[in-house]
Image: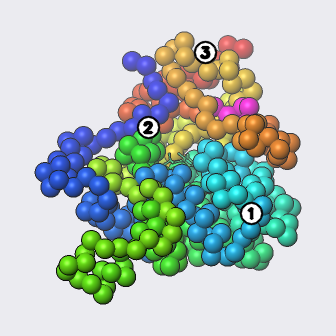
C-alpha cells in the first residue's frame, strides 16, 4: 500500500445521516445546518461570532474589506504579511487594492515580529498572521506590536482548527480582529469547501453576514413588517455570494465531533517523527510552541536535498509533498523578491511528510526508517 502525504478521513455514515436530514427537509442552502454549525463552532472555540462561508479565501477577503472600510484605509496602504503561505492570504490583500509588504518568517515558519517591526511604515495598517501548520508562532508578540503601532490584526487560521494555548483558541485572544478558518477538503476539519470568519466585533460580524450574501439586509423589513412583507428586503452593499451551505455544514457538524481526538493522533505522529529524526543531522525539525495543544495540520522539515529525497521515498511508495513556496517567487509578488532571505532560503528545502488519520504507527516507523536510510546510504 502506498502512503500519501495528505488524506482526509470522513465519518461517512454519520455524515450521510446529517446530509440525508438536509435532503429530506429539502434544505441544502444557507440556514438550518449552517446556523447549527456556527453555534457548534462558537461553543467549541469560544468565539463570540462565527459566520459560515464557502471558503477561508472568501473570509480573508471579507476581513480585509470590512476592516478597510471601518478604519478608512486607502488603496495602496500596506498590510504586512508572510511569504510562506497559501496565496489566499496575500490575494485577499490585493482584492481590496491594498499593498502586501512581506516580512520574514521565524524558526516556526510564522511571520517574525522582529521583521514586522522593521517593515512598518506610515502606510502600514494591519498584519496578516498565518498560524502556519497550526502553530501559534510568536502571535503574542505580534499582538503586542500591533497594539503599540495601532495596527489591526487578521489571523489566517486555515491550519488552526483545534489549536489551543492553555485551553484557549488563539483566534479569540484580545487584539485579533478577525480569525478565519478553512474547512477545505484536506484541512483538519475537512468538508468539501467551506470556511468560517470570526470577528471580535459584533458590528463587523453583522456586516460580514450581509456582504457574504450579496449585501442583502432583511432586518429593516423583518422588524417593521411581519407577515405580508416577509419577502421584502433592502440591499445596502455590493456584496458577494460567499455564504456556506447546509450540506457542507452537515459534514462539518460531524467532523467537529472528532477534531480533538484526531488532532491528538496528529500530535502523536508528530512526536514520533520528531524523535525519529532527532539524531539525523541532515534534518532540521520545525518546532512548535505549545506543541501539546497544536493542531499540526502539516509536518514539514528542512532537508538539504529535497528532490532526491522525494524521489527516493517515492521508489518505496511513500509520497511526500512540497507545500507552499515563498510567495515572492511568484510573478504577482515578485516585486518583493529578496526582502525575506530566511523564507527564500528555507522554502527550497521544505518537505511535507505524510500526516493524517490513515497512518498506522507502523507506517510512521517505515517512513522514518526510509528517510534515515536515505541519509545513511550517502
Ligand atoms: C487552505 C488555505 C487557505 C484557503 O482556504 P480555502 O478554504 O481553500 O479558501 C488559506 N490560507 C492557508 C494558509 C491555507 O492553507
Q: Quadrant of residue 331?
A: top right
Percent position of residue 299, x then y: 56, 39
Name the residue carrying label 2. Answer: 356
Find out whether the residues at labels 3 and 1 contact each other: C-beta distance under 8 Å: no
Give the spatial CA distance, label 2 vs label 1. Answer: 41 Å
The yes-or-no answer for disc 3 within 8 Å of ligand 1 is no
Magenta stretch, residue numbers: 347-351
Task: Tell me the tag on residue 359.
Answer: none
Q: Does the magenta portion include 350? A: yes
Q: Quarter holding the N terminus?
A: top left
For numbered disc 3, what is the local secondary structure?
Answer: helix
Between circles 2 and 1, the one closer to the viewer is 1
Residue 327 visible from this viewpoint:
yes
Callout 2: helix, strand or loop? loop
The residue tagged 3 is 312
| Badge 3 or badge 1: first in the primary sequence | 1
- Nearer the observer, 365 or 167: 167
Relative to 235, is 334 above or below?
above
Q: Residues within 10 Å of mark 2 (few under 14, many from 20)?
A: many
What residue is rendered at 35% in x and 39% in y? 9
In front of the other: 134 or 60: 60
- Single out the residue that lies furthest toward the bottom: 224
Residue on which the image places disc 1:
75
User: Could you say whether the residue bearing mark 1 is in a helix, strand or loop?
Assistant: loop
Residue that appears at 61% across and 16% down: 311
**Along the horizontal axis of the image, is 355 left or right of 146?**
left
Label 2–label 1 contact, CB within 8 A: no
Q: Give whichever of 237, 287 is nearer the camera.
A: 237
Amino acid at each position: 500500500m502506498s502512503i500519501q502525504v495528505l488524506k482526509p478521513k470522513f465519518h461517512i455514515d454519520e455524515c450521510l445521516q446529517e446530509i440525508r436530514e438536509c435532503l429530506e427537509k429539502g434544505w441544502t442552502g444557507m440556514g438550518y445546518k449552517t446556523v447549527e454549525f456556527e453555534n457548534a463552532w462558537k461553543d467549541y472555540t469560544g468565539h463570540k461570532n462565527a459566520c459560515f462561508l464557502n471558503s477561508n479565501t472568501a473570509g480573508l477577503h471579507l476581513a480585509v474589506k470590512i476592516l478597510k472600510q471601518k478604519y478608512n484605509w486607502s488603496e495602496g496602504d500596506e498590510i504586512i504579511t508572510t511569504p510562506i503561505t497559501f496565496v489566499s492570504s496575500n490575494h485577499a490583500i490585493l482584492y481590496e487594492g491594498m499593498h502586501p509588504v512581506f516580512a520574514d518568517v521565524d524558526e516556526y515558519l510564522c511571520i517574525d515580529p522582529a521583521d514586522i517591526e522593521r517593515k512598518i511604515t506610515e502606510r502600514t495598517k494591519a498584519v496578516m498572521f498565518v498560524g502556519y501548520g497550526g502553530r501559534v508562532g510568536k502571535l503574542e508578540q505580534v499582538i503586542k506590536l500591533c497594539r503599540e503601532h495601532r495596527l489591526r490584526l487578521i489571523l489566517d487560521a486555515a491550519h488552526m482548527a483545534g489549536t489551543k494555548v492553555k485551553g484557549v483558541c488563539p483566534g479569540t485572544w484580545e487584539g485579533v480582529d478577525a480569525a478565519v478558518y478553512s474547512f477545505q477538503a484536506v484541512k483538519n476539519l475537512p468538508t468539501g469547501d467551506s470556511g468560517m470568519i470570526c470577528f471580535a466585533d459584533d458590528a463587523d460580524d453583522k456586516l460580514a453576514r450581509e456582504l457574504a450574501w450579496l449585501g442583502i439586509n432583511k432586518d429593516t423589513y423583518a422588524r417593521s413588517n411581519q407577515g405580508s412583507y416577509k419577502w421584502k428586503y433592502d440591499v445596502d452593499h455590493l456584496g458577494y455570494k460567499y455564504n456556506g451551505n447546509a450540506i457542507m455544514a452537515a459534514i462539518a457538524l460531524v467532523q467537529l465531533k472528532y477534531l480533538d481526538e484526531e488532532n491528538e493522533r496528529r500530535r502523536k505522529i508528530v512526536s514520533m517523527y520528531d524523535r525519529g529524526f532527532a539524531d539525523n543531522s541532515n534534518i532540521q525539525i520545525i518546532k512548535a510552541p505549545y506543541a501539546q495543544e497544536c493542531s499540526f495540520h502539516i509536518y514539514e522539515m528542512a532537508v538539504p536535498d529535497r528532490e532526491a529525497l522525494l524521489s527516493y521515498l517515492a521508489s518505496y511508495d511513500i509520497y511526500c509533498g512540497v507545500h507552499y513556496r515563498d510567495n515572492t517567487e511568484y510573478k504577482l509578488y515578485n516585486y518583493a523578491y529578496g526582502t525575506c532571505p530566511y523564507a527564500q532560503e528555507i522554502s527550497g528545502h521544505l518537505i511535507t511528510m505524510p500526516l493524517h488519520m490513515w497512518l498506522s504507527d507502523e507506517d510512521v516507523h517505515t517512513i522514518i526508517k526510509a528517510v534515515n536510510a536515505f541519509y545513511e546510504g550517502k
